Amino acid sequence: MANDASMETSGLQWKWVALGVIAGLAIVGASYFIVAPTFHSDEIQALVMLVGYAVTGVIVGYFSPGVTIKEATIAGFLVLLAMLGLLYATKADLIENPSINLLLLMLGVAFSWVGGWVGEKLQGTTADAHTKGFQWKWVITGVVLGFALNVLFVFLLAPAFRIDLNVILAAFIVSFVATGFIVGYKSPGVTLKEPALAGFLSVVVDWLFLQYGISLSVPGRYLVAGLAIGFLFSLFGAWLGEKYQEAVANKAAG
């Protein structure tokens, strides 16, 4: 957990903008070029790229000292310009869709900002240790992480395993365990309800994208199963995270 001294850094930190651009180009670029040959849907390709911007923001917000949401946002914008230029240069099918281009322009920066905010929450401050009661910020953090990991785990692993449904289901489950673990470990106090609710809501976001983003109708029984998986495995991951947090604290105490 970050200490208060680390929060004293002020001014725009161009080093973290530059590092964010490097990380973003690697994450967003790799995600797109892995997914594009298998999934020819412009919406899926755009979604994977947008999640890449969010992950870039998380990295900058978490690892950089002080509050660096601006740096994450600027880095995301620069990566967005670079990726659009690369897509034009390679004459990618995605770039020929005006609505998708507009979506990338509008949401790319927003996703970077959200990612930076989540990274700052995961970084934490000593003041967070005194927070009690149900913490909605950790629900929001968990939803962002859960949705991002769902997308990356499922769509990036699917091409490698030729869209094996068993592998996709396993990746879906692991993404929730990972989300719960991160929130449970990084959040102060006992936060089991927050990541469990976040897992549930992440599935709702997944469903909204499938239903309205790519017009893929999901049968009710699969939606119910997905909601149960999101809730239970996020809860399990949070429990593991809390146990690990406790073990680390006991080791530090001697």
Image (cartoon, rainbow, N blue to C red):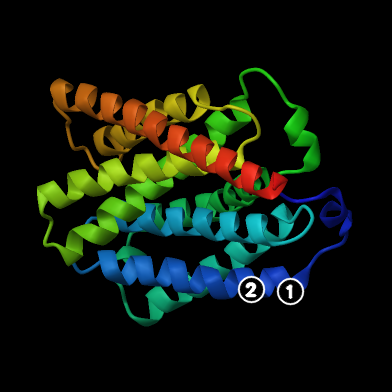
Q: Looking at the picture, how far across and down is residue 42, in whole percent?
A: 28, 56
* Residue 206: image tag: none
| 96 up-or-down from 165: above or below | below
Which one is in front, 235 or 85?
A: 235
Residue 212 appears at what percent x and percent y?
A: 29, 34
Q: In the rendered view, does 141 fall on the left or right side of 131?
A: left
Which residue appears farthest toward the front when viewing the image? Answer: 254
Q: Secondary structure at mark 1?
A: helix
Task: Evaluate whether residue 42 shows in this view.
Answer: no
Q: CA distance from mark 2 to mark 1?
A: 6 Å
Q: In x, y percent, where is residue 165?
A: 11, 48
Q: Residue at x 19, y 43 (%)?
A: 169
* Residue 17 against residue 214 in the figure, above or below: below
Circles 2, 1 touching at the beta carbon (< 8 Å): yes
* Residue type at tag 1: Lys
Disc 2 residue crowd, few under 14, some 14–19, many 20+, Cα 10 Å: some
Residue at (60%, 25%) from the top-left corner?
Answer: 136
Nearest the camera: 203 or 166?
166
Res 138 quadrant in image: top right
Point out residue 49 in the picture as x, y percentages from the top left corner: 41, 59
Q: Residue at x 29, y 25 (%)?
A: 227
> What type is the residue that disc 2 sits on?
Leu
Q: Looking at the rendering, which quadrant does residue 36 occupy?
A: bottom left
Q: Which residue is mark 2?
A: 19
Q: Is residue 254 above or below residue 196?
A: below
Residue sitting at x 73%, y 26%: 131
Judged from the image, the secondary structure of the residue bearing numbered disc 2 is helix
Outermost residue toward the top in this view: 133
Q: Work out whether 66 lies above or below 80.
A: above
